Image (spheres, helix red, strand yellow):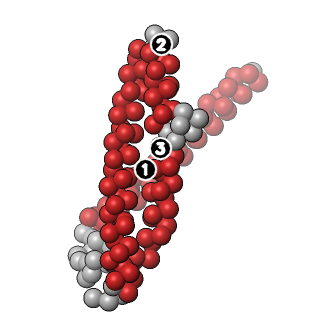
Amino acid sequence: MSATRTSATSVRRRLTGRRAAALGALALAGSLLAAAPAQADGAAGSPSAGSTPTGDGAKAICKRLPKTEQHVTKALTRLGGDATVAGSVARLQQRADNAKAAGHTEIAKLLNDRLTARKGLVTTLQTRQADLNAVATWCAAHNEGASK
């Protein structure tokens, strides 16, 4: 009889746990549904609540410029490194060549697709670096973005 009593008790416990979990999920869903209309209306205090920018953010851009230039330079250095540099174009090219030589055609295709994207990233970062140089000149001529 104790085996029957034990199994009945464990069944009740499992059902109670499932009910509690279902009630918790229901309460969470209800609170999310109640919050959705307030977010959709653009509640006061949210940044997109009908406000428009009053400036171009030049002062903040000029302030972040040195750090941004460092990030771009570091990324270009890494991408331009030789096959021993993790993340470089040459290393990924070597991996793709190794996969092709080993007959791993699907791996080689994946790596070549990544290589194409990485080469595109180099072009994008070079363009960005040129843009940042022009912005640095502008910031120097306009009191770090403080003057209008």
> Is residue 15 at least partly visible in the picture?
no
Check disc 1 and report the residue beneath it. Answer: 26
Structural distance between the alpha carbons of marks 2 and 3? 23 Å
**N-terminal label among 3 and 1:** 1
In percent of the image, x 72 and y 28: which residue is there? 6
Check disc 2 and report the residue beneath it. Answer: 101
Q: Nearer the viewer, residue 76 or 32?
A: 76
Say what amino acid the circle numbered 3 marks: Leu
Q: Is residue 41 above or below residue 138?
A: above
Marks 1/2 in contact by CB < 8 Å: the verdict is no
Q: Badge 3, how many Cα within 10 Å: few under 14, some, many 20+?
A: many
In percent of the image, x 51 and y 54: which residue is there? 74
Structural distance between the alpha carbons of marks 3 and 1? 50 Å
Q: Nearer the viewer, residue 38 or 114?
A: 114
Q: Quadrant of residue 63?
A: bottom left
Q: Is residue 103 above or below residue 95?
A: above
